[in-house]
Amino acid sequence: METFITISVDDIRLQGVLNKGSESKAVVICHPHPLYGGRMDNPVVTTISNAFVEKGYASLRFNFRGAGGSTGSFDDGTGEQDDVRAAVSLLVEEGYENITLAGYSFGARINAEVVSKGLNVEDHIMVSPPVAFMSFDDISSLPSTGLIVSGDQDEYAPTDLINAQIKRWEIAPRYEIIKNCDHFYSEGLGELEKILQSYLS
């Protein structure tokens, strides 16, 4: 059952939704760009959450600072990294030991930076990392990255650029490409959920 919660980051209060599910494994899911309408109730974000819950995970999604019911203001990706760390810390305090970090679009970019700086998570999943919209050049390594998903019609996350970054990071994640799917997954949500459930199995 979903419960609204508050995540504290210094004097900022983030609005979140926690589905407790499992007692040991959990996922934090980060939403797309706040300045372009990204929120925790985005259909891709909720699809990711549903897939994890179906596989027995607890799921925590939240609004970055300045988005939805969260206080504060957009911080160009800097303060948002603290938001991610605070969400993971909350799950640790709740007793979860196996934590996955998943993000869609802007959320994937923020998570990549946090992971590259040493945040310890069990697994790291990126859905449509926006490599053609935001620079990933400062991300030197991405340990724990197990899955990347994008659409073959995604102009913000084109497959050739993602493959180039995978090679540069020297990682070997499972990389799934959804046919006839753009960045917004208007025709790809069902396939995305199938991929996630298959991966989590």
Image (cartoon, helix red, strand yellow):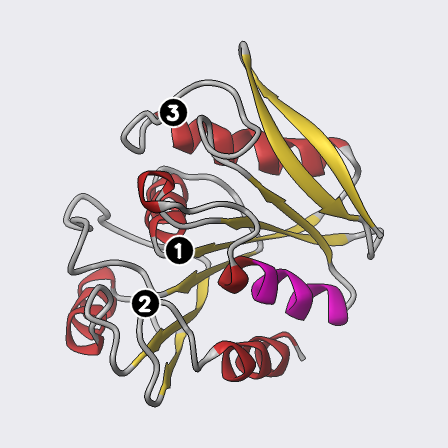
Q: Are marks 1 and 2 in contact (CB under 8 Å)?
A: yes
Q: Is residue 25 or residue 74 the one in the foreground?
A: 74
**Label 1, residues with CA under 10 Å away: few <14, some 14-19, many ≥20:** many
Compared to residue 6, the image places residue 3 above or below, namely below
Cα separation between marks 2 and 3: 27 Å
Cα separation between marks 1 and 2: 7 Å
- Callout 3 secondary element: helix
User: Which comes before the other along the chain, label 1 or label 2?
Assistant: 1
Give x and y (percent) for residue 78. 32, 27
Q: Which residue carries the number 1 mark? A: 143
- Callout 1 secondary element: loop
Q: Residue at x 54, y 9 (%)?
A: 11
Cα separation between marks 1 and 3: 22 Å
Mark 1: amino acid: Pro
Which mark is on residue 171?
A: 2
Q: Are marks 2 and 3 in contact (CB under 8 Å)?
A: no
Q: Are marks 1 and 3 in contact (CB under 8 Å)?
A: no
Q: Residue at x 41, y 39 (%)?
A: 118
In this rendering, the label closer to the viewer, 1 or 3: 3
Apparent side of residue 51 relative to residue 4 in the rendered image (left or right)? left
Q: Secondary structure of the magenta portion, mostly? A: helix
User: Which comes before the other along the chain, label 2 or label 3?
Assistant: 3
**Label 3, residues with CA under 10 Å away: few <14, some 14-19, many ≥20:** some
Q: Quadrant of residue 62?
A: top right
- Magenta residues span 46-54
Which mark is on residue 79?
A: 3
Mark 2: amino acid: Ile
Q: Residue at x 43, y 82 (%)?
A: 187
Compared to residue 81, the image places residue 97 above or below, namely below
